[in-house]
Amino acid sequence: MVVEKNVPLQPWNTFGIAARALSLVRIQSVADLLQVRTMPELCDAPFFVLGGGSNIVLTGDVRPVVLKMEIKGFRLVQETPKAWIVEVGAGESWHDCVEWTLRNGYPGLENMALIPGTVGAAPVQNIGAYGVELQDRFESLDAVDMRTGQSFTLTAEQCAFGYRDSVFKHGAPTIAGQGADARNLGLAGRAVITHVRFRLPRPWQPVLGYLDLERRREQAGVDCPDARQIFEWICEIRRAKLPDPAVVGNAGSFFKNPTVTPEQCTDIIAREPKIVHYPMPDGSVKLAAGWLIDACGWRGKSIGKAGVYEKQALVLVNRGTEQDSVTGGEVMTLAKAIQTSVYERFGIRLEPEPVVV
């Protein structure tokens, strides 16, 4: 195993921010992770897991050891009358995973097509789009505890999934008497996901609740679209709304859609009748963060080389060049200005989705 030094990270973060990893190790197997623990210069050092770099903002050179996840592989683990169980390596591209399942006759992930990033990052963020979240298709995952070297498996319940949230985004509480068995209370900076398994229900049922999908269905004159058709519609919708990171640097949706109580929503609607909102199964109401940002006049605006995308105010973009890129500081200055505007007008605090490093 080679420890690479002063590695440029600009090609490995979709915002295209210029920064370096002081130390970087490519992880292609569980054995590689275990070897990291035996290396004197690495075993006690903090680490940062890098997948597709699609949900991070680099504010400077990365001092923790960067573990570049490159564990590959797809396989059907089990097929039952009720589901296909599929296992995927953490280093595989998420979109490639969606395509592979469809190509092999295991539908169910199509609504999450074109979400950037890797499979290993998907449970961390509990990714989701167009009516489906990862937790809806999740079976279990394997990970390595980097403190002990032990491999372990977590179920959906143990992952503590929430809206763009999981146990992997929180540190373990420092409570006397709680050791490794408390791993389900917080695994940030401790565990590294190696494989993820998905439960894809049989018989397959389409998820078509979103207006954009219904419009596509009506335009196509299709009453019962198949999974491949939904996949293609999702790709078309996302490409029309969101910039391609290969062309315009970005980290996808920058803010979470906030949730409020029905009473709070009623109060906001009284002041802002056009606000876009969605009732949730738990009784709360989700507000469209992009609409809130747009209403504050931020669409198309910039601070330095950080800008708000013209077609979707929820996306912040890199208006610099490869040679003169936006900085993480500029991105966060813009993000904080947007947060302030939204709070002053609506009394709502927007929470960023990306990890700030």
Image (cartoon, grey):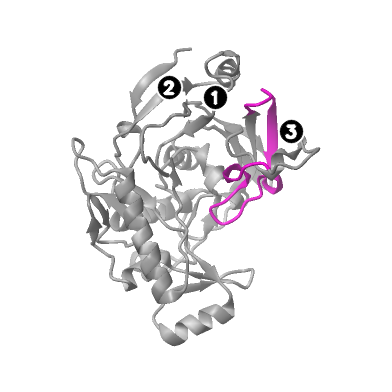
Tell me which numbered mark, 3 or 1, is placed earlier along the sequence: 1
In reply to whether residue 101 is colored magenta, the answer given is no
Residue at point 42% right, 47% down? 115
Tell me which numbered mark, 3 or 2, is placed earlier along the sequence: 2
- Residue flagged by tag 2: what amino acid is it? Ser
**Image-quadrant location for residue 145:** top right
Circle number at residue 333: none
> Quick one: 341 or 187, which is closer to the camera?
341
- Residue flagged by tag 1: what amino acid is it? Ala
Q: Is residue 208 above or below residue 230?
A: below
> Quick one: 172 or 108, which is closer to the camera?
172
| Residue count near mark 3 (Cα–Cα under 10 Å), binned few <14, some 14–19, many ≥20 | few
| Residue count near mark 1 (Cα–Cα under 10 Å), binned few <14, some 14–19, many ≥20 | few
Q: Which residue is mark 3?
A: 180
Q: CA distance from mark 3 to mark 2?
A: 27 Å
Q: Which residue is mark 1?
A: 45
Mark 3: secondary structure: helix
Residue at point 58% right, 33% down? 193
Q: Which residues are magenta?
A: 145-172
Report whether residue 182 is seen.
yes
Which label lies toward us, 3 or 1? 1
Q: Which residue is mark 2?
A: 23
- In the displayed structure, does residue 27 sit left or right of residue 219? right
- Residue flagged by tag 3: what amino acid is it? Ala
Residue at point 36% right, 41% down? 59
**Image-quadrant location for residue 290:** bottom left
Pointers 3 and 2 in contact (C-beta within 8 Å): no
Tell me which numbered mark, 1 or 2, is placed earlier along the sequence: 2
Residue at point 38% right, 18% down? 5
